[in-house]
Every structure is written in C-alpha cells, then in structure tokens.
Image (cartoon, rainbow, N blue to C red):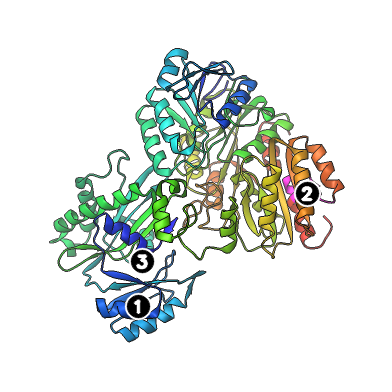
C-alpha cells in the first residue's frame, strides 16, 4: 500500500526533452516508474528513449491514459503546465520546478482546486513509492519499501531522513516532498490525511521548517481528528533570524508567525515526538515502531 | 526587490492613485529648493525599512533654511544599517483621518488578501494584535480580482465600528473602491508580495491620498520587471533595487549563491535550503555561533563548493568552515577532491570539516583525511568537530 502513486500510476512528463526532464525521466524509469508519455509542444510523433512525445497534455492523456503528470519545465512556464494537466483532469500533478512566481502559483492553485485534482509542489523533490513509482528527483538508491510514511518540505533534508531510516532497516510506504514555496498544492495536513487512510503506513515522519503555519495547521488537524499513528517531527531553522529568507522562498519568519518554536510547541501538543537531529529521527521512529 | 517609498508612490500614481506633490532630494540644497517650490514639506528618509519616523528620519519644515538643515541631518543618518542616500520632500497634507490599506499574501488561504482598517498610521501592528476586529479583510478570486461591491463591503465593515464615520461612510467606501482596485492592479501587474499604503489619508474634501507607500516585488518574477528594476535603481535587473544591503549578501548575489550573513564565527555550507538551515541549528546545538547561511543548491559540484567556500571566507570573523553535503548521485570523491583543491588554491589555513554522503563517500573521506581536512561521519559529529576546532581544540 502507499499514497498518491503506486504500480498503477501512468506517468506523463511535461518538458521531457529538456535537460532536467530527460535526465530524470530515465532515473524515474530506472526506479520502475511506468512513464507512458512526454509532452513537448512541436515534437509530437517523436520519442524520448522510446517514450512517445505529444504536443499537448490532452493528446497524451487521450492516447496513453496517463494519470500522473510530472512538470520539469522552466519557471516562466510552470504554472501554465500545471493548469494544462489540471484541465485534462489528470488526478495528480507533481511540479518540480523551482523559482515559480508566486502570483502564477495563486492562479495555478485556484485552477487546480476548481478542477478537483491535486497538485504537489512546486519547488519540491516529488514523490516516491518504493518498488512502484517515482515522480520527481528523489535519488533512487536511498528508497526502500517499509512501514513509514515520510512528508517533508525540504528536498535534501527529506533525503537524509529516507536514507537514515533505510540504513536502519526502516523503509517507506511513500515519501512525499511538498516543497518550500509559500504557495503550494498539497499541504502537510492533506498528506497526513492520506497516510491516515493507508493501512500499510504505521508511522509518519514530518520534516518541517520555519515559515508559514502549515505545520501548526497539521498539528491542529492531528488533534481534532484524533490521528492515532505515531508521528516523529523534525523542524529545521531553529536558529534562523526573523525577517531573513533562508533559501526557500517560504522559509521566513515574519512577526510571530513561522518560528520553529511555535511549530515544535504545536506538534508536541498534538502528540508528535520531536527530533533534534536526523539520528533522533531514526531512533524515535524505531521506538515508535517497537523496534528499539 | 523592495522599492523605496518614492518609487512605490510613482507606481501608485501611474495607476491613478492620488499622491501628495513631492520631489526627491539627494543634497540639502535640493531639499531647500523643494521647500521653496512646494511650501511646507515633510522631509522623509528613503530607506527600505519601517520605523524611520521613530529613528528621526522624518521632519516637517516650513522654511528653506530649516529644510536644508533637516535634510543635512537626515542624509547623515544610518537607519538600522541603511545609510540614507536620498530624502523625499513632500507637500504637507491636511488630514482628517488616517486609514490603512494593504495587499499581501495569505499563505494559508493561498490568495492575496486586501486589508483595510479605519485605524491606520504608525500603530497598525498594535491594532492588529490588540483589536483584530478593527481590521477587515477580503480575499479576491485570483482570476476575477476584487469587485467594487466587495471593497465597499470591506469599507462599511471597518468604518461601521466608528461613529465618527456615520455620515461619511458611503462616500469613503466609494473612494476606497477606486483606490483598492487600482492598488490591486499594481500588486498583480508588478508581482508584489506586499503593497501597502499606510497611512491612506482622508482629506477634509473627502479624497483618499497615499501618504506613504511600500512595495516589495517577488524576486522569482524579477525577469518580468527588468524595466522596473533598471529604471528605479539604475542597476541591472536581478539585483536588489536598494543600495545599502549587507555587503556580503550583495557579493553572494553576484556569485549566484543563496547566502544570509549572520553574527557568529563558524562558516556553514549546505546543499538544499532545509539541510543548510539544519546545519546552522546543529552548530548552535554544539555551542557554536553560525557566521552565515549558505545553500549551494540541490546538486553539489566541486566548482559550486569552491565558490561557496571562497564566499564564506570573505567574512574575516570566520574561524572555521563546516561543509555539510547530501550527495545523492553526486560522487563523494569528486566533491572531496574539489574541497582539497579549493583549499590549496585559496590557501585556506582555517580548519575545515566536511560531512558528505553520496556514491563513493568512503573514497571521498579518505581523500579528505589524507589532505588534513576533517571528515565527519554524521552532521552532528561534524558540527561538534568544527566548533572544537574553531576554538583551537582537538575535535
């Protein structure tokens, strides 16, 4: 079992002929992902290492039955690409592209909601269900199947957790990178809801960071819903000064909102175990799974 | 990109929002001449930061002599790290009430929010904290924008709480519909993250005038506004529209690095924003003080690491550098060789600690060890090592 992507996922790649798109398409296929189509306007009829290319998402969906889209186009075109797959009612679009203008995302997110489909990202590492499907750029070799659901805002820090858990014999149902932008698709809360409904997920690791209140919102939902799977949370940016944007566009403390302490307090109150280091994440997760 | 007050106001005026008559002065003489032409004026320091009034950056004068003297004083100020390079000399307004009108991003709702309050002025943050009911909000649909009736509703909601507006509410609401619609146009046209008029002055003849202006443009959209950046700053697009930024951060921008200057003495380099932030947390946890935040980006080529190392060491406070890299498919031996080469070429004598994962990481650690650079097995261990080494102790 898993969330969002599995062995039935049929993936189309927007921007498949670009540098990032072509490289990661091959990585995704090496992972075992069923990449059924690429989209690159003006290149229909061609193929990318055997993957048929279409001019439009609509054509690709009609011809191949693609049900997940991965967006690897440059920032200026990312919002349009997201809306294109949403308009074709592709159930899940994963946008890897970084530096997408916020105003573009306001429209894209609204469009996606209106079409009743889901968006992951932008500026995210994507999603991986070991042994079944990966959409995005999470390094292949660190993933292993197992009982832990992982959801994180930061790319490399999420990889650290995947790898750290894996090295201690704890694999993942699905790892989900929601991204570090201020305006994004799936939130921590929505991913937790998916993990709640997934029987195979026995514990969740949440990797948050300063900025916004998505972690606090997730904590509130955990309390209200009585979420009963163990959660280990890790918050980065405890020492970040207010008013400074720490790399991610979304990682900024403004006024009293977005501080690490507020997130840690909220998650603690919701019953999550707080980890100070990656080693702590591994230790606490093992304990919660009854493996220590 | 943060615009200065006068730059923001010029944008507002171009969109049809009324602003007071004013003129920019870079010298005391220019300020005196502005007073001669405009009469009684406020002289306002042009710095990209709030709280300038309390810092002595605003003066009201009614003679050329006073204008010269006050401009001279203000042009010599340094307001929270920002030297004052120019002052905006603005005709005094007769003000009946001060409102607040702002547009900013509401992350939770994933929409822009238009905020209006009848209690504008210096203390708006206090109002927001203590009497949130005095702040009215509207979240327009991003495809439709705000409708006039919605803004009138917003105005009636805010004004209805104060009996002094009983007579004038409808007139103000109509005027606000015009101003807020135009401000929303400015915000969306310019990709603004914040677009604010505080105070929005109500004059005795019922006009709404932007007595101040704040405008911050999304850096991710800077490519759409090269003209703004160039025209406003006389600087190439992509760089900050304001001068007086931290010199280290300006240098980092030129080098294409995401860097934040801090006050400590441990240089920190990580790849990926979350991991780089966590690197700082670990250094602090081990009793050290980070000198900076630096994210070299997702991949971590030897060239990138070298550039980052050079950047971090420009700060002479730095006593040692901790490099924390999640390699993924990057080869550890290549990163290690890159670090050794950079150290030799840059003749770095200060201690370096490198923690990295990736393919061939054992090989990488051996290369570092041989070259006298401390390899760490975990990030926590690396942080402990660099904090000890920077204090002149053995790890």
- At mark 2, the secondary structure is helix
What percent of the width, then of the height, locates residue B239?
Answer: 50, 55
Furthest toward the left, the residue is B167
Placement of B223 over or under A224, stated as above or below? below
Judged from this view, the residue extending furthest toward the bottom is B65
Q: Quadrant of the C terminus of chain B?
A: bottom right
The residue depicted at 45 percent of the width and 71 percent of the height is B85
Residue drawn at the location 28% of the way across and 43% of the way down: B145
Residue A245 in the image: above or below residue A194: below
Which residue position is annotated with label 1?
B31
Residue A63 % position (x, y):
44, 13
Give the labeled residue for mark 2. Answer: B341
Mark with earlier residue (1, 2): 1
Please, what secondary structure does the residue beneath circle 1 have? helix
Q: Which residue is outermost to the top? A: A63
For the N terminus of chain B, the quadrant is bottom left
Which circle, 3 or 1, is nearer the viewer?
Answer: 1
Dot 3 or dot 1: first in sequence order is 1
Chain where mark 1 sits: B
Marks 1/2: CA distance?
A: 55 Å
Magenta span:
B372-382
């Amino acid at each position: 079992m898993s969330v969002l992507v599995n062995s039935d996922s049929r993936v189309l790649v927007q921007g498949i002929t670009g540098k990032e798109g072509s490289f990661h398409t091959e990585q995704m296929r090496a992972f075992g992902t069923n990449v059924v189509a690429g989209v690159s306007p003006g290149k229909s009829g061609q193929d990318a290492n055997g993957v048929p290319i279409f001019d439009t998402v609509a054509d690709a969906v009609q011809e191949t039955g693609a049900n997940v889209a991965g967006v690897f186009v440059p920032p200026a075109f990312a919002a349009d690409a997201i809306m294109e797959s949403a308009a074709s009612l592709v159930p899940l679009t994963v946008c890897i592209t970084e530096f997408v203008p916020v105003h573009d995302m306001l429209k894209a997110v609204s469009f996606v909601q209106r079409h009743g489909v889901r968006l992951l990202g932008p500026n995210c590492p994507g999603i991986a269900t070991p042994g079944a499907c990966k959409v995005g750029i999470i390094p292949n070799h660190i993933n292993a199947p197992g009982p832990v659901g992982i959801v994180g805002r930061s790319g490399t820090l999420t990889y650290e957790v995947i790898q750290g858990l894996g090295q201690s014999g704890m694999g993942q149902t699905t790892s989900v990178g929601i991204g570090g932008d201020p305006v994004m698709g799936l939130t921590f809360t929505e991913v937790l809801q998916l993990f709640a409904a997934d029987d195979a997920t026995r514990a969740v690791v949440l990797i948050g960071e300063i900025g916004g209140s998505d972690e606090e919102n997730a904590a509130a939902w955990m309390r209200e819903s009585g979420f009963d799977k163990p959660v280990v949370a890790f918050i980065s940016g405890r020492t970040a000064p207010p008013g400074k944007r720490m790399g991610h566009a979304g990682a900024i403390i403004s006024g009293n909102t977005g501080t690490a302490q507020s997130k840690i307090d909220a998650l603690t109150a919701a019953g999550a175990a707080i980890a100070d280091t990656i080693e702590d994440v591994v230790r606490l997760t093992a304990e919660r799974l009854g493996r220590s | 990109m943060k615009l200065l007050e006068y730059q923001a106001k010029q944008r507002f005026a171009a969109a049809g929002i009324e602003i007071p008559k004013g003129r920019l002065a870079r010298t005391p003489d220019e300020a005196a001449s502005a007073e001669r032409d405009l009469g009684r004026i406020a002289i306002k320091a042009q710095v990209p930061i709030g709280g300038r009034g309390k810092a002595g950056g605003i003066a009201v004068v009614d003679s050329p002599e006073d204008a010269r003297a006050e401009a001279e004083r203000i042009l010599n100020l340094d307001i929270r790290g920002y030297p004052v390079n120019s002052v905006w000399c603005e005709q005094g307004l007769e003000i009946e009430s001060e409102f607040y009108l702002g547009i900013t991003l509401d992350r939770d709702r994933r929409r822009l929010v238009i905020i209006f309050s009848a209690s504008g002025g210096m203390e708006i943050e206090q109002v927001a904290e203590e009497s949130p009911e005095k702040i009215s909000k509207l979240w327009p649909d991003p495809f439709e924008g705000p409708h006039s009736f919605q803004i009138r509703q917003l105005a009636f909601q805010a004004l209805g709480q104060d009996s002094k507006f009983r007579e004038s509410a409808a007139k103000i609401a109509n005027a606000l519909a015009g101003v807020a619609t135009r401000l929303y146009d400015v915000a969306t046209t310019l990709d603004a993250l914040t677009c604010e008029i505080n105070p929005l002055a109500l004059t005795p003849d019922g006009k709404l005038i932007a007595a101040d202006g704040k405008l911050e443009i999304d850096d991710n959209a800077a490519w759409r506004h090269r003209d703004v950046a160039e025209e406003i700053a006389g600087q190439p697009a992509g760089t900050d529209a304001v001068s007086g930024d931290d010199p280290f951060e300006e240098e980092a921008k030129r080098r294409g690095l995401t860097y934040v200057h801090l006050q400590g003495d441990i240089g920190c380099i990580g790849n990926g924003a979350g991991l780089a932030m966590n690197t700082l947390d670990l250094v602090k946890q081990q009793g050290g003080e980070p000198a900076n935040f630096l994210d070299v980006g997702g991949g971590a080529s030897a060239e990138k690491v070298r550039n980052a190392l050079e950047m971090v060491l420009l700060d002479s406070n730095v006593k040692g550098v901790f490099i924390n890299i999640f390699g993924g498919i990057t080869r550890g031996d290549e990163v290690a060789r890159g670090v050794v080469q950079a150290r030799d070429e840059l003749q770095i004598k200060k201690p370096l600690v490198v923690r990295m994962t990736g393919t061939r990481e054992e090989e990488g650690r051996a290369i570092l060890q041989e070259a006298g650079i401390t390899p760490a097995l975990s990030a926590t261990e690396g942080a402990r090592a660099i904090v000890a080494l920077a204090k002149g102790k053995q790890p």
